[in-house]
Image (tube, rainbow, N blue to C red):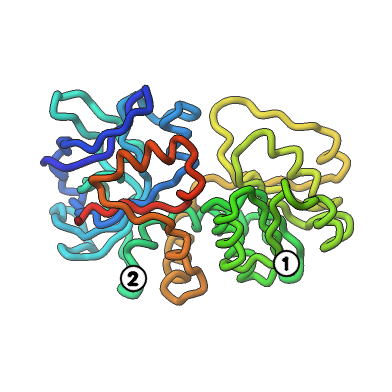
């Protein structure tokens, strides 16, 4: 079947164009996308070849929310008209016949995907907003990292980088009763961190971060979440940990090796955690539940709701580092 998709090429040019998707198998669903959510960090890493999940051209996007339009004969528990969330799409082809890598391909007007599996489809609660739910992976990634490190109520945590995953960490830690310091250079991210429960918001170019941490918790923070994915931030973030504290590699640092100064974490005898992905269905359902009940005001993280017809120009702006663009959902139903 034909669909519209956002395509990126090796030169980092963007196009919205007609593609062909395979017909669904008996084990698959056909879903009409209402919103696809943008993960700025991971998608730019793919577009810039910092990490690779397949050859160019690419259709990125790994989360979306939509309506089931067709149900394979072997699929149970789903019906036409169901509201769902999902993680991926099938490989597609351009009108020329050129193959497009679906990585994971949710920036597309339709999705053909397996109903089951670890990255399949899940029902969306009727009280959950479709637009915020389309960005469900990012807070789930943060929630999973928080569960791994297990900071306790009253403990001081530093969230080093307050993009969308960092905001998910802020919200999860705040809901646990932690004392949260959110760090970022972007004033928009810091404003949102305050809305999501951060007790302190710090721009390290304007305030002394180390002095602040020492004031709040002499000796350092119990847990530091490094959420930027920028290798140059690893050592400064480790320096904020206390002896016997914990450091969470919450960012994605790409395929290239990263380095750190050994002695500081060695001397502090730190525990380190390496969360990967969103923790699975339990975490996805938890963040959707929290969105619906108001303890995760995730719609506030959406800085831009854009029609699919404008997606190419917005991705060019994202790729150029426009600081006003934080959380983006693409609307495919306009």
First in sequence: mark 2 vs mark 1: 2
Q: Is residue 8 visible?
A: yes
Residue 314: horizontal and vertical position, in percent?
Answer: 36, 43
Alpha carbon of mark 2 to alpha carbon of mark 1: how far?
31 Å
Disc marking residue 203: none
Residue pictured at 16% horizontal, 42% vertical = 3
Q: Which label is found at residue 179? A: 1
Residue at the image point whose x is 72% and y is 52% from the top: 224
Q: Position of residue 89 (x, y in %)?
A: 28, 43
Quadrant (top left, top right, bottom left, bottom right) of the C terminus: bottom left
Q: Is residue 121 visible?
A: no
126 on left or right of 259 = left
In the depicted structure, whether residue 1 falls above or below residue 94: below
Q: Along the horizontal axis of the image, is 294 left or right of 226?
A: left
Q: At which x and y percent is residue 330?
A: 31, 51
Give the structural element (helix, strand or loop) at label 1: strand
The quadrant the N terminus occupies is top left
Q: Nearer the viewer, residue 33 or 78?
A: 33
Name the residue located 49 percent from the left edge and 41 percent from the top edge. 41
Position of 111 with respect to 200 (left or right) is left
* Horizontal relation, residue 220 to residue 112: left or right: right
Residue 108 screen position, x and y as percent:
25, 44
Label placed on residue 125: 2
Asked if the residue under mark 1 is in contact with the one under mark 2, i.e. CB atoms within 8 Å, the reply is: no
Q: Quadrant of residue 218?
A: bottom right
Q: Image point 16% across, 44% down: which residue?
A: 25
Q: Secondary structure at mark 2?
A: loop
């Amino acid at each position: 079947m034909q669909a519209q998709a956002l395509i990126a090429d090796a030169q980092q040019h963007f196009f919205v164009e007609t593609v062909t998707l395979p017909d669904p198998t008996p084990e698959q669903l056909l879903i009409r996308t209402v919103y696809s959510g943008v993960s700025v960090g991971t998608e730019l890493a793919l577009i810039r070849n910092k990490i690779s999940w397949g050859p160019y051209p690419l259709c990125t996007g790994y989360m979306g929310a939509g309506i089931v339009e067709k149900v394979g004969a072997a699929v149970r528990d789903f019906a036409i008209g169901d509201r769902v969330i999902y993680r991926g799409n099938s490989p597609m082809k351009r009108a020329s016949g050129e193959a497009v890598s679906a990585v994971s391909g949710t920036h597309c007007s339709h999705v053909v995907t397996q109903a089951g599996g670890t990255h399949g489809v899940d029902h969306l609660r009727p009280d959950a907003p479709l637009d915020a739910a389309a960005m469900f992976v990012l807070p789930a990634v943060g929630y999973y990292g928080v569960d791994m490190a297990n900071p306790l109520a009253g403990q001081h945590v530093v969230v080093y980088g307050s993009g969308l995953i960092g905001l998910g960490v802020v919200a999860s830690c705040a809901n646990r009763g932690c004392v949260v310091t959110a760090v970022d250079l972007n004033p928009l991210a810091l404003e949102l961190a305050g809305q999501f429960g951060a007790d302190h918001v710090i721009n390290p170019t304007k305030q002394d971060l180390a002095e602040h941490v020492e004031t709040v918790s002499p000796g350092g923070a119990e847990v530091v979440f490094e959420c930027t994915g920028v290798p140059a931030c690893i050592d400064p973030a480790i320096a904020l940990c206390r002896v016997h504290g914990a450091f969470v590699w919450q960012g994605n640092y790409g395929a290239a090796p990263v380095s750190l100064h050994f002695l500081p974490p060695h001397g502090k005898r730190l525990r380190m955690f390496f969360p990967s992905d969103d923790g699975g269905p339990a975490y996805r359902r938890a963040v959707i539940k929290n969105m619906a009940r108001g303890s995760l005001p995730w719609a506030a993280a959406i800085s831009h709701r854009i029609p699919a017809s404008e997606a190419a120009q917005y991705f060019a702006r994202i790729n150029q580092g426009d600081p006003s663009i934080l959380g983006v959902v693409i609307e495919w139903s306009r």
